[in-house]
């Protein structure tokens, strides 16, 4: 349980620490992260070796957990909270839980404190001879602080609680004079005394580990992007191709142009020369190509288009008012030609073409 809490707490603390430097430069993030990653590596190694020792497993397996910690730290410092970094963090957490789930060895459990151990005692005294002797009556083992042989007091099963209490009072015990638990300073000092020799013995290994972490972070940070990754960044969206004007009726005229009708409004459509797409002429603003300002037939009848537009593939559309539809269709059936936007349009055979379409035939008679 303690191993699992230590490992998961390290992951959580490291992720919170990395979150403080998400917006920092890669060099600053790597330098700051190493201050937590390297001490964390020492804690991971010590915790793993202690747990493996308790479960009677090879101590070299601790380096597997250490490698996962270093890989996770390097990935988080190079690209914080990306998919690879979070997967490595999850693998480290699973490895810690698996390590914590290993059962303790029987040899250690025999002398563990509490009801699970031998006579509820854990200390420097070898109690293995007691395990071989048959216990004929209940015995109490007095703790020894100086490593001397333990004293055993036979207990009478028929003794009352008062007699047991008097026997305990008459027994010399150091526990009456000492505090009930270790002080915080003593605990910290004892932990420091255990870590300092370990760091001195593993100084070369820790130095190599630190250099590997820094090198891995630098490589992952400055690794050049592939061409495919560069192309996927900020790809401009293609412009949507506009749709042609809607119409209800259409008739193809002999001279490569069409007459369209939409809600009684007449539209003349024809392919023209290359021009900039958009509005070519507007009657509302009187701006644009002045040659599109009017449609003129050969008998000098003239009609003003509301607007003229150029659409994709250089298709021209001239829009006329519904008030002029009847006159324009009649002139298109009766006249010889007309001119619009600098283009001449012939009307030979237009009478038969227009009368063959019911929507336009109505305007050819007067």
Image (cartoon, rainbow, N blue to C red):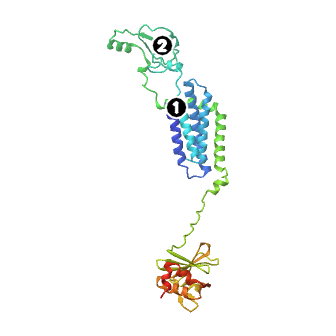
Residue identifier under label 2: 150
Residue 3's label in the rendered image is: 1
Question: Residue 245, labelled with which disc?
Answer: none
The front one of 70 and 46 is 70
Q: Secondary structure at mark 1?
A: helix
- Along the polypeptide, which appears first: circle 1 or circle 2? 1
Pick the front one: 361 or 40 = 361
Q: Residue at x 51, y 75 (%)?
A: 249
In x, y percent, where is residue 280?
57, 80
How would you rate the neighbour count of disc 2 (Cα within 10 Å): few for under 14, some for 14-19, many for 20 or more? some
Q: Residue 200: percent from the left, percent from the top?
A: 63, 32
Which residue is at 60% across, 35% downward?
A: 66
Q: Position of residue 266 (x, y in %)?
A: 51, 80
Crowding around mark 1 (Cα neighbors within 10 Å: few <14, some 14 to 19, many 20+) is some
Q: Can residue 351 be seen here?
A: yes
Query: With respect to residue 106, does 36 lie above or below?
Result: below
Q: Position of 168 compared to 245: left or right?
A: left
Counting labels gives 2
Query: Residue, x 32% and y 12% (percent of image)?
Result: 160
Residue 217 screen position, x and y as percent:
63, 45
Nearer the camera: disc 1 or disc 2: 1
Image height check: is 90 above or below 249?
A: above
Question: Is 225 in front, or is 251?
Answer: 251
């Amino acid at each position: 349980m303690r191993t699992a809490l230590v490992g998961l707490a390290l992951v959580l603390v490291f992720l919170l620490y990395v979150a403080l430097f998400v917006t920092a430069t890669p060099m600053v993030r790597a330098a700051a992260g190493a201050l937590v990653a390297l001490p964390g590596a020492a804690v991971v190694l010590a915790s793993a070796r202690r747990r493996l020792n308790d479960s009677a497993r090879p101590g070299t397996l601790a380096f597997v957990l250490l490698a996962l910690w270093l890989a996770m730290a390097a990935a988080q410092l190079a690209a914080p909270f990306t998919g690879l970094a979070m997967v490595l963090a999850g693998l480290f957490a699973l490895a810690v839980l698996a390590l914590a789930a290993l059962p303790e060895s029987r040899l250690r459990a025999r002398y563990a404190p509490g009801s699970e151990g031998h006579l509820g005692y854990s200390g420097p005294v070898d109690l293995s001879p007691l395990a071989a002797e048959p216990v004929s009556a209940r015995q109490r083992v007095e703790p020894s602080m100086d490593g001397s042989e333990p004293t055993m007091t036979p207990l009478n099963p028929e003794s009352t609680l008062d007699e047991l209490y008097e026997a305990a009072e008459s027994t010399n015990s150091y526990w009456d004079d000492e505090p009930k638990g270790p002080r915080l300073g003593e605990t910290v000092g004892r932990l420091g005394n255990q870590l300092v020799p370990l760091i001195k013995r593993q100084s070369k290994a820790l130095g190599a580990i630190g250099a590997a972490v820094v090198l891995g972070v630098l490589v992952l940070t400055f690794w050049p992007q592939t061409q495919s990754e560069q192309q996927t960044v900020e790809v401009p969206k293609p412009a949507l191709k506009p749709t042609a004007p809607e119409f209800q009726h259409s008739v193809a005229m002999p001279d490569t142009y069409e007459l369209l009708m939409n809600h009684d409004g007449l539209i003349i459509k024809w392919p023209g020369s290359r021009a900039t797409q958009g509005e070519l002429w507007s009657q509302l603003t009187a701006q644009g190509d002045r040659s599109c300002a009017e449609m003129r037939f050969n008998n000098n009848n003239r009609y003003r288009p509301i607007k003229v537009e150029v659409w994709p593939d250089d298709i021209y559309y001239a829009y006329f008012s519904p008030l002029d539809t009847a006159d324009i269709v009649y002139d298109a059936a009766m006249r010889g030609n007309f001119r619009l936007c600098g283009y001449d349009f012939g009307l030979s055979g237009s009478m038969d073409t227009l009368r063959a379409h019911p929507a336009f035939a109505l305007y050819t008679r007067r």
